[in-house]
Amino acid sequence: MSDIIHLLPESVANQIAAGEVIQRPASVIKELVENAIDAGAGEIYVLVTDAGKTCIQVIDDGKGMSETDARLAFERHATSKIQNASDLFALHTMGFRGEALASIAAVAEIELKTRQADQELGTRLLLSGSRLEAQEPVACSPGSNFSVKNLFFNVPARRKFLKSNSTELSNILTEFERIALVNPQVAFYLYSNDSEVFNLPVMPLRQRIMSIFGKKLNQQLLSVDVDTSMIKVSGFVAKPETARKKGSHQYFFVNGRYMRHPYFHKAVMEAYDQLIPAGEQISYFIYFEVDPASIDVNIHPTKTEIKFENEQAIWQILSAAVKETLGRFNAVPTIDFDTEDMPDIPAFEQARPIEPPQVHYNTDFNPFKSAASSAYFQEKGKGERTTSNKGWEALYDGITPSDRTDTASVEEAIPDEGMEWKIPAAPSSEPAASLLPSTPRTGMEQGGTHFQLKGRYILTSVKSGVMLIDQHRAHIRILYERYMHLLQQKKGSSQGVLFPEIVQLPPSEATILEGIMDDLNAIGFDLSPLGGGSYAVNGIPEGTEGLNPVEMVRDMVHTAMEKGKNVKEDIQSLLALTLARAASIVYGQVLSEEEMANLVDCLFASPTPNYTPDGKTILATIKEDEIEKLFK
């Protein structure tokens, strides 16, 4: 039998590595920009065409490479960051494995121009699919200039699974924001299809955050600064009143590297316990500085997950630091006894006897002697009627005695001053059985048959027993069907607002909004761009009056970002569901009988009344035999 195990060709091995390291155009930009930072660049320019599918160009003014280094940099596991295994525990650079450039070259066409500052000429390299096409001297500026074209040109399956341009550009901007947030000492510039998206000169960290996410964030941030022998924690957390369900900016950085860490996220949220509503999130930008030997950044191909040696101790330090910040800036609600409006609380005197409070009331008060009844009573103490009502019979001139109440009965209805008033007994009510429905209608029963339970459920009788309907979910299903119809027919009616509101979005979210703008217009939104990621909300869908239009737009943008949908129909479904959730009736809202009947009728007119669009149960039935078992 012949041997069956063999070594993979270098090009195939590089493509396999690229599948882990290079997932989309944003991955290319992340690797190239991090390499530029490691090279000591002070300015970095990123230019993308067609969201990076056609071309990605990264230009820096770092130290550059020699002719030999430029050629060797594209070999697998070629790196200048480490020499031996022990260096893995003392990393101070972004890249170290030497797989990035080799992986990019395996799935794209690359042109590199690089020159060291002390050299007169630089080097130009052309590579395609890991194969060197040309190498020659060239005149260029100090630093490196990478041009990556036709990404995944030789892996059609990978290229086919790339998302739309707006989604891929949003991913690029997200990666760019993460790098810019942790390197305020570097100037960053990003252009998309020759349009400037980011212009971030060197600036302090707080100003860098505002430059990316808007100046409004400046009033929301509280600074965190704690230094211990184990870890140094710095950065900013948001005030509790800025919490919201979606769209919070949450970032952790360790030694200049972005990371995801759900465990530390819980530490931050634990500090806000009882300060923000359940299910809502707050923004934070937290930077850790630890000994590199106490962390492992090599557990994930993209290096976004990091293992800590003392996670539990860091959890406690982080939670305490955030709590201290909230207390130091009075973000926790307290009672202020120094204000002038505080009530005067008398001092307790032990020698003073304790007496029950005295209740004072007027024994001569008679409600029938008020101004409204002065026509019937005379002065206090007299039981005779006043003369002002003499001739009141003239009001009934022209009315036959059969059409009016007899004078005597009217006079008998006027009470004397000393008469004792009693509440008359209620007339005998009809039997309880008469309140039950009798005529069935489409499986439901009519005639006062709907009852509301705890402001959440609608109870109604059906042939098989009792049906419980979740009013909030039922309304979501109804509105979802309505908005989907408007989207498909492009006939959404818009309700103009008296004063347009401004929604400010970072570039990564603004690109998503541009991609769904046509669908928002079809629903009934009227948005006009103001530049710089700002949009004026001039109109909202009819039926959503009273809702916050800015939050509605944000929710739909964030939902589209989270789901990452690419098909137009899926985007429309997401928009319809998000708007339906925002506009539906809330739990606790009291409904009239007519409103409940209309809600039930509209629900059963839907093709799928049993479940919400996201699969949650709307109604449940308690069968009659189950009810009978309860009373045995």
Image (tube, rainbow, N blue to C red):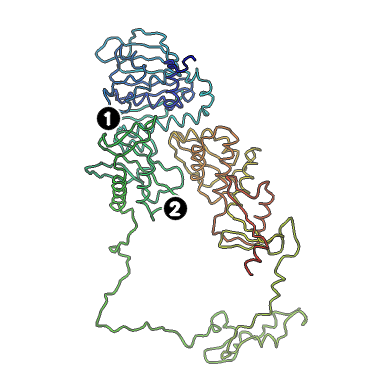
Residue at image x 67%, y 58%? 597
Q: Secondary structure at mark 2?
A: loop
Q: Residues within 10 Å of mark 2 (few under 14, many from 20)?
A: few
Task: Name the quarter where the C terminus is drawn.
Answer: bottom right
Q: Earlier in the sequence, mark 2 or mark 1?
A: 1
Residue at image x 64%, y 66%? 629
Side (left or right) of 155 relative to 186: right
Q: Position of residue 36 (x, y in %)?
A: 33, 23
Quadrant in which residue 339 is drawn: bottom left
Does residue 454 lie above or below 496 as drawn?
below
Q: Which residue is under mark 1?
A: 92
Residue at image x 24%, y 13%? 118
- Distance, label 2 to label 1, CA atoms, is 39 Å
Q: Position of residue 211 (x, y in %)?
A: 36, 35
Does residue 584 lie above or below 458 as drawn?
above
Does residue 124 lie above or below 308 as drawn?
above
The residue closer to the viewer here, 149 or 505, is: 149
Q: Position of residue 55 (x, y in %)?
A: 45, 20
Label 1 is placed on what type of residue?
Answer: His
Q: Which residue is under mark 2?
A: 278
